[in-house]
Amino acid sequence: MTTSSSAPLIRIIVGSVRPVRVGDQIADALAPLVAEASGARVEIVDLAAVGLPMLDEPRMPALGDYRNAHTAEWSRLISESDGVVFLTPQYNGGYPASLKNAIDFLFHEWKAKPALIVSYGGHGGGLSGAQLRGVLEFIGLDLVGGNVEITLPRDAYGPDWRLVSTDAIVAANEEQVSAGVRELGRRMRAQADARIDAEAAVA
Ligand SMILES: Cc1cc2nc3c(=O)[nH]c(=O)nc-3n(C[C@H](O)[C@H](O)[C@H](O)COP(=O)(O)O)c2cc1C
């Protein structure tokens, strides 16, 4: 599917930052599927590359009074996204500290943001996704109703602890991913329509 630069923008946030990980591989394989199912432009935001320190803003993020350039840049990335896919592994029954830290840096940027949660792990990372849902509901994102859960069997990993075939993993979950992304696209369009209506009412 071709998209124009005026198409809405979905950012896939890679929540794991380990030096040897699979989150980046899954994001790469998901991106074309997300673009196809949504008609949106898709960009991957890798928290390992964003490189946020542990939350170092002196003021509470809800005040929006950011002092650090890295916070302003992170704020820009989320603010200009029409929708977000949170891609999270499961670590010890929850989602990684790197993702919680990145979420906590901001506040208003997340409000009503259309978002889809995609978890992965040996059994689909369901506990991680559920825990993340609780936090994102508390903040007030516009969350797609069900999480996508990607199961990574032990034999999906090679001797280097990277995935042998991400295409096979994504293909096995294609229907679930596409359904979640289509719902994400509907929420993004509904918000865009509401903005147009609000602008027309003011004009
Ligand atoms: C600290 C840590 C804790 C983990 N805990 C779980 C777990 O609770 N359940 C599970 O199914 N897999 C668990 N795993 C396995 C991860 O799901 C698997 O390593 C996955 O590849 C992690 O994503 P990443 O490679 O992108 O970091 C854990 C892995 C790590 C590093």
Image (spheres, grey):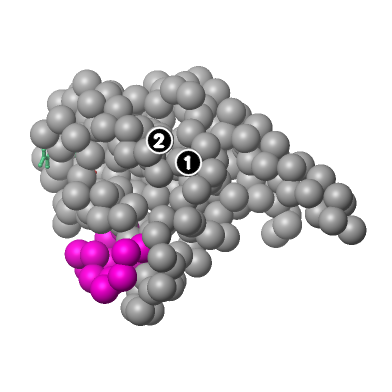
Classify residue 186 as left or right of residue 121.
right
Identity of the residue drawn at 39% across and 50% down: 13
Quarter of the image with the C terminus in it:
bottom right
Query: Which of the 4 image quarters holds residue 134?
Result: top left
Where is mark 2, residue-wise? 137
What percent of the width, then of the height, locates residue 17?
A: 23, 54
List the single residue furthest toward the right: 203
Classify residue 139 as left or right of residue 51.
right
Q: Disc 2 marks which amino acid?
A: Glu
Crowding near the residue tagged with mark 2, few <14, some 14–19, many ≥20 C-alpha atoms within 10 Å: few
Where is mark 1, residue-wise? 141
What percent of the width, then of the height, locates residue 146?
A: 44, 22
Q: What is the secondary structure assignment of the residue under circle 1?
A: loop
Q: Relative to 104, does residue 63 appear above or below in the rendering?
A: below
Quarter of the image with the N terminus in it:
top right
If the picture is divided into quarters, which one holds ligand 1? top left
Q: Which mark is residue 203?
A: none
Q: What is the secondary structure assignment of the residue under circle 2?
A: helix
Q: Which segment did they paint magenta?
A: 47-61
Identity of the residue drawn at 26% across and 73% down: 58
Contact between marks 1 and 2 (CB within 8 A): the answer is yes
Q: Relative to 182, does residue 199 appear above or below in the rendering?
A: below
